[in-house]
């Protein structure tokens, strides 16, 4: 069944953070309405002087932005570039796909955000050295990594006397 979305059947909700510069309007996640299995998509609107999510990349998701109206500056690992209406931007998995938008104009920037959803994703934030386990929203400082076997040295005690030789 085809599902058609347009200005008449889409509403936006303001998403604000503790940091006022990170604020955007988002449609309800359209992919949930249609019960999409492998794609997440929604419309976003970035007001003047606002940033999208913190600078980040995904370990297990590809993402595409389609600029529907307005302009925004895109930050990538190698450059800053102005995006215009009609631009289609693909972000690959991994550090090379890191991105963030900033609306440097006086008019809102509307864009379609499409991303793959094939299970658990790890989103990394290079500016703050954090990782986020999605969809659970478990956020950790990346610099607290430990050796794989840390704390595993007393395995016999955890099994108890019954099974120890």
Image (tube, rainbow, N blue to C red):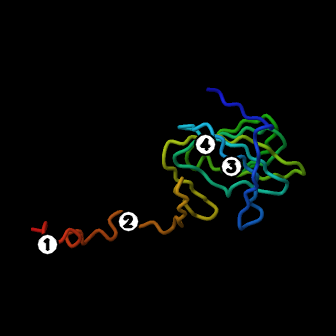
Q: Residue at x 84, y 43 (%)?
A: 70
Q: Please tell me how crowded label 1 is: few (under 14), some (14-19), or many (20+) other residues with Cα within 10 Å.
A: few
SS assignment at label 3: loop
**Residue, far left:** 165
Q: CA–CA distance between discs 1 and 3?
A: 56 Å
Read off the residue under disc 3.
76
- Quadrant position of the C terminus in the picture: bottom left
Given this view, does label 4 or label 1 mark the residue nearer the observer?
A: 4
Q: Earlier in the sequence, mark 2 or mark 3?
A: 3
Residue 113: percent from left, percent from top? 68, 42
Q: Secondary structure at mark 2?
A: loop
Q: Which residue is mark 1?
A: 161
Residue at the image position 75 percent from the left and 49 percent from the top: 80
Give the CA separation, mark 4 to mark 1.
Answer: 50 Å
- Mark 1 vs mark 2, foreground winner is 1
Judged by depth in the image, the label closer to the viewer, 1 or 3, is: 1
Q: Is residue 21 left or right of residue 128?
A: right
Residue mark closest to the camera, 4 vs 3 = 4
Q: Residue at x 80, y 47 (%)?
A: 72
* Residue 9 shown left or right of residue 124 in the figure: right
Establish if 130 lies above or below 97. below
Report the Cα–Cα distance between label 2 and label 3.
31 Å
User: Horizontal placement of 107 versus 150: left or right?
Assistant: right
Question: Residue tagged by mark 4?
Answer: 32
Q: Residue 9 location, x and y as percent?
A: 76, 38
Mark found first going from the N terminus, 4 or 1: 4
Q: Earlier in the sequence, mark 1 or mark 2?
A: 2
Q: Is residue 41 above or below residue 2?
A: below
Mark 2: few/some/many CA within 10 Å (<14, 14-19, 20+): few
> Would you name the residue on which mark 2 appears?
147
The tag earlier along the polypeptide, 4 or 3, is 4
Toward which corner of the image does residue 68 lie, by quadrant?
top right
């Amino acid at each position: 069944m085809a599902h058609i979305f347009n200005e008449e059947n889409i509403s936006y909700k303001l998403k604000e953070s503790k940091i006022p510069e990170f604020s955007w309007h988002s449609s309800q996640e359209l992919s949930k309405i249609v019960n999409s299995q492998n794609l997440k998509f929604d419309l976003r609107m970035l007001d003047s002087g606002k940033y999208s999510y913190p600078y980040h990349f995904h370990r297990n998701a590809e993402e595409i932005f389609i600029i529907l109206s307005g302009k925004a500056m895109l930050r990538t690992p190698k450059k800053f570039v102005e995006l215009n209406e009609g631009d289609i931007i693909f972000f690959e998995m991994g550090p090379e796909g890191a991105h963030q938008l900033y609306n440097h104009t006086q008019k809102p920037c509307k864009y379609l955000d499409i991303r793959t959803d094939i299970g658990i994703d790890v989103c990394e934030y290079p500016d703050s050295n954090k990782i986020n386990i999605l969809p659970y929203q478990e956020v950790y400082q990346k610099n607290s990594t430990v050796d794989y076997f840390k704390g595993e040295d007393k395995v016999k005690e955890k099994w108890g006397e019954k099974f120890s030789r």
